[in-house]
């Protein structure tokens, strides 16, 4: 089997910056894509990387790619008044993939490093010609519509051995509850939900995250006397500092909590 890799590098770059605040490690990304391609799809015949190489973020990148045996494909981009930025990478990728489909019958698998919905038409054409299509993208930017058309999909996070976005949220929650517990006799559950949401109005995602933490034993809940009404105790929360994830995030530094598992309802 033989495969080709078409990578919308600009899309991956900005998606990583938006989701994680860091740019992808170029060496690691290219090496991981090649290893994945060879392991799953046989020989990788070529790799193209698409970006507006005139943009200040990507100047000098063309030579870096060429040294790594990746063919850079320059595409022009445009900035819009709302602050968004769009290039023609999806069009160029689609045209190159179709040309490859018609001129290289020996290519079995097309790896598209881009999760945009705009790629659906070319994916359908490739599949109709009996080609395997493997899509790789940042998890939160991967179109669910695209996923239903491909033979296989892989997240950048799993490819690079990163934690998925949900785990980043969980680590952030652990650190926030750790900070809230400092110097306080207890942390009210409703109070912590507002801290986590950053608002007096708690969104569904925050409830779901805390419920998950409680069900997995990361957070313990327990009752404390309510100073405003003795008949209705307050539900408090604290970290289970014996939990492996809590230890990994904060270090092994605190005694085990004594709360009982519970759930949060909106």
Image: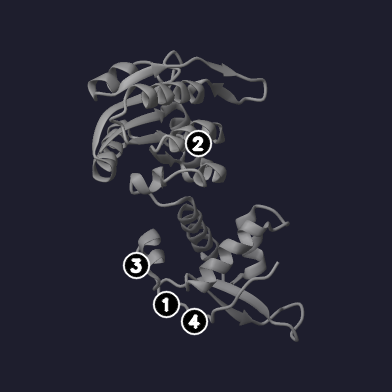
Q: Secondary structure at mark 4?
A: loop
Between 86 and 125, the one lying in front of the other is 125
In percent of the image, x 28 and y 45: which residue is there? Answer: 40
Q: Answer above or below: position of 112 versus 63.
A: below
The picture quadrant where one finds residue 228 is bottom right
Cβ–Cβ below 8 Å for labels 2 and 4? no
Q: Secondary structure at mark 1?
A: loop
The residue wearing badge 1 is 256
Mark sitting earlier along the chain (2/4): 2
Q: Callout 4: few (<14), some (14-19), or many (20+) C-alpha neighbours within 10 Å?
A: few
The residue wearing badge 2 is 124
Q: Callout 1: few (<14), some (14-19), or many (20+) C-alpha neighbours within 10 Å?
A: few
261 lies left or right of 154 = right
Mark sitting earlier along the chain (4/3): 3
Q: Answer above or below: position of 225 versus 31.
A: below
In percent of the image, x 38 and y 27: which residue is there? Answer: 101
The picture quadrant where one finds residue 247 is bottom left
In percent of the image, x 54 and y 67: which residue is there? Answer: 212
The residue wearing badge 3 is 252
Rendered location of residue 91, percent (x, y): 51, 22
Rendered location of residue 71, percent (x, y): 31, 20
The residue wearing badge 4 is 258
The nearer-to-camera label among 2 and 4 is 2
Between 116 and 213, the one lying in front of the other is 116
Mark sitting earlier along the chain (1/2): 2
Cβ–Cβ below 8 Å for labels 1 and 4? yes
């Amino acid at each position: 089997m033989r495969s080709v890799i078409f990578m919308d590098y600009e899309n991956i770059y900005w998606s990583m910056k938006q989701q994680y605040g860091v740019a992808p490690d170029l060496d690691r990304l290219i090496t991981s894509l090649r290893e994945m391609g060879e392991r799953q799809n046989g020989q990788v015949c070529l790799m193209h990387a698409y970006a507006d190489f005139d943009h200040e973020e990507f100047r000098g990148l063309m030579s870096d790619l060429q040294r790594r045996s990746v063919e850079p494909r320059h595409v022009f981009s445009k900035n819009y008044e709302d602050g968004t930025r769009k290039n023609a990478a999806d069009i160029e990728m689609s045209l190159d993939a179709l040309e490859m489909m018609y001129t290289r019958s020996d290519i079995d698998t097309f790896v598209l490093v881009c999760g945009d919905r705009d790629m659906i038409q070319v994916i359908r054409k490739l599949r109709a010609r009996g080609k395997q299509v493997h899509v790789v993208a940042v998890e939160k930017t991967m179109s669910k519509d695209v996923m239903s058309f491909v033979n296989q999909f892989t997240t950048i996070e799993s490819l690079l051995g990163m934690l998925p976005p949900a785990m980043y949220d969980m680590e952030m929650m652990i650190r926030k509850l750790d900070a809230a517990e400092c110097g306080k006799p207890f942390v009210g559950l409703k109070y912590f939900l507002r801290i986590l949401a950053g608002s007096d109005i708690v969104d569904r995602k925050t409830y779901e995250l805390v419920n998950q933490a409680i069900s997995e034993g990361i957070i313990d809940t327990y009752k404390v006397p309510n100073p405003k009404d003795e008949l209705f105790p307050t539900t408090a929360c604290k970290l289970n500092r014996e939990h492996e994830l809590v230890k990994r995030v904060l270090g092994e530094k605190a005694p085990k909590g004594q709360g009982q598992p519970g759930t949060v309802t909106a």
